[in-house]
Image: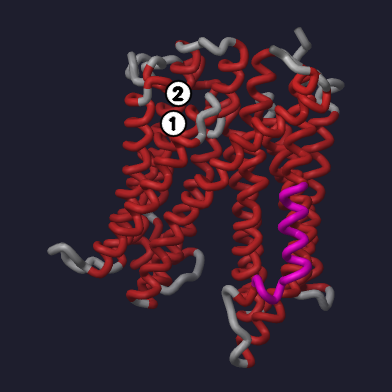
């Protein structure tokens, strides 16, 4: 029996909020687990050898830049499946086509990326790294990179179960991969259970194996769970479907470029901090780690918003689309407001989790990190809005113009402003953070403005 609470506007918004949160909360856990897999290698090597730690950190950073680009490409899986699921909840063939061609696209993008990563040592030398460090980091990448394809397969299958509003299965697989990586890395780095001590190479092997576990885990879920088995995702797998293959690239390549511009502008910020001084660089590393952890919540809300918007887009339901946008933006802003409040009220306690002001050098790093967190309090609010706004636009498969917005916001405004304030005023490192916040604010305004004007721009479906 339908009650007034569920049919009233307030009831509809409350239900949409619960559905979005039910998607977003497991995604938070999954995103944190994914980040932890790469971090685990660095933490374990930190206990093994300083030189190995430096090489792994350098290797992971380069590998992750290309990994994020590839992730952006296959992110197209989520809005495409959500739209198909929204149009016809019993659709099997169209959803299978999308998953199959997303895996084809994963293989296609891996080939040039592997060719580039195979020459990682030469890339590091071009960037001015020492020969010894470049050689060691290159060895790490040459092993770890083979986990890229199985990771992308697992990611496609994770997007599949999430688009069908069953995200917990992806979390189970991610947690299994995280546990496996921690154990395998420790065993292979230090040597245990009769296996040799492999050091840096052991961490790289563990990383590649963990990503393979994620891929295999995804395959086991979609072939073993009755809810997903009926899609027969690997049926006629070798049959080409060039129309859907092109659709993956059409929607996904702009997302990949957006991700690439975002991660590279933050890498450029690290470079600027290094020019300012070691204390600023260390403080930036601490502050950005805190901000990145807090960002997992709005990021996950944005991913959930992609699915919810995609479903309504497939149904051609403009009323539901508008409602899910309001709910997602409100949830993203609320989560960011909470993290911003913590950064504003207890910055010393947060920074103290990473560094203690024992020596004079440590005290300077501590002071700068606290100052950076003051800017990060504002940074979180605008970063949340741009993440959710971008997620909503992806849900309606609007990705090309947002890519241009990202380039304008991150690089033309953000990087330029940060560089100017850092080196032409007395703000130094704080100026870099103000520039990043300004770039994100501009991107947020553009993304959210395009979402709000989607009807006038001809982006919104016609209500049935």
Q: Is residue 85 magenta?
A: no
What residue is at 41 percent from the left and 22 percent from the top?
A: 228
**Pointers 1 and 2 in contact (C-beta within 8 Å):** yes
Of residues 346 and 251, the one drawn nearer to the viewer in this rendering? 346
443 to 89, vertically: above or below: below
- Which residue appears farthest toward the left when viewing the image? 194
Magenta-highlighted stretch: main secondary structure? helix
Which class describes the residues within 10 Å of circle 1: few (<14), some (14-19), or many (20+)?
many
The location of residue 441, given as percent across then percent down, is: 80, 50
Q: Residue at x 60, y 92 (%)?
A: 359
Residue 232 in picture, x, y percent from top left: 36, 16
- Decide if residue 444 is on the left or right side of residue 222: right
- Please say if 52 is above or below 262: below
Residue 393, compared with residue 26, is above or below; it is above
The image quadrant of residue 58 is: bottom left
Residue 131 seen by the camera: no
Task: Tell which tag, 1 or 2, sits nearer the viewer.
Answer: 1
The quarter in which the C terminus is drawn is top right
For disc 2, the marked residue is: 99
List x then y, in percent, for residue 55.
40, 68
The residue under the point 41% across, 28% down is: 103
Q: Which circle's residue, 1 or 2, is located before the other in the chain? A: 2
Residue 324: image quadrant is top right
Q: Label 1's element?
A: helix
User: Which residue is nearer to you in this view: 388 or 13?
Assistant: 13
- Magenta stretch bounds: 334-350
Disc 1: which residue: 157
Residue 40: give x, y in percent of width and height.
Answer: 41, 61
Is residue 339 magenta-colored? Answer: yes
């Amino acid at each position: 029996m339908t009650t007034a609470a569920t049919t009233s506007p307030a009831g509809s918004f409350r239900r949409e909020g619960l559905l979005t949160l039910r998607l977003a909360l497991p995604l938070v856990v999954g995103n944190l687990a994914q980040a932890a897999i790469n971090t685990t290698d660095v933490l374990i090597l930190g206990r093994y050898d300083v030189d190995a730690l430096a090489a792994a950190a350098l290797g992971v950073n380069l590998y992750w830049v290309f990994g994020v680009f590839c992730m952006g490409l296959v992110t197209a899986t989520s809005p495409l499946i959500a739209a198909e699921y929204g149009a016809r909840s019993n659709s099997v063939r169209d959803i299978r086509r999308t998953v199959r061609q997303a895996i084809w696209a994963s293989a296609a993008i891996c080939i040039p990326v592997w060719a580039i990563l195979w020459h990682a040592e030469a890339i590091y030398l071009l960037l001015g790294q020492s020969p010894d460090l470049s050689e060691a980091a290159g060895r790490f990448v040459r092993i770890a990179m083979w986990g890229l394809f199985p990771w992308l397969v697992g990611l496609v299958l994770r997007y599949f179960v999430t688009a069908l509003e069953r995200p917990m299965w992806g979390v189970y697989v991610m947690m299994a991969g995280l546990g496996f990586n921690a154990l395998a890395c420790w065993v292979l780095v230090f040597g245990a259970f009769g296996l040799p001590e492999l050091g840096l190479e052991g961490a790289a092997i563990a990383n590649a194996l963990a990503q393979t576990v994620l891929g295999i885990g995804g395959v086991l879920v979609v072939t073993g769970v009755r809810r997903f088995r009926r899609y027969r995702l690997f049926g006629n797998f070798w049959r080409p479907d060039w129309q859907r293959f092109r659709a993956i690239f059409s929607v996904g390549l702009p997302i990949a470029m957006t991700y690439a511009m975002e991660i590279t502008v933050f890498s450029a910020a690290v470079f600027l901090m290094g020019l300012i001084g070691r204390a600023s660089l260390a403080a930036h590393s601490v502050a950005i780690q805190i901000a990145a952890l807090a960002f997992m919540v709005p990021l996950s809300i944005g991913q959930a918003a992609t699915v919810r918007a995609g479903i309504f887009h497939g149904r051609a339901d403009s009323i539901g689309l508008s409602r899910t946008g309001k709910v997602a933006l409100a949830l993203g802003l609320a989560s960011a407001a909470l993290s911003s409040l913590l950064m504003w009220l207890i910055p010393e306690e947060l920074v103290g989790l990473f560094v203690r002001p024992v020596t004079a050098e440590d005290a300077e790093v501590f002071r700068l990190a606290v100052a950076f967190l003051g800017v990060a309090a504002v940074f979180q609010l605008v970063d949340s809005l741009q993440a959710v706004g971008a997620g909503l636009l992806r849900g309606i498969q609007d990705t090309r113009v947002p890519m241009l917005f990202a380039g304008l916001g991150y690089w033309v405004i953000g990087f330029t402003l940060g560089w100017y304030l850092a080196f032409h005023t007395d703000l130094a490192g704080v100026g870099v953070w103000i520039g990043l916040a300004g770039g994100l604010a501009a991107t947020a305004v553009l993304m959210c403005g395009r979402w709000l004007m989607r009807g006038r721009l001809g982006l919104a479906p016609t209500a049935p």
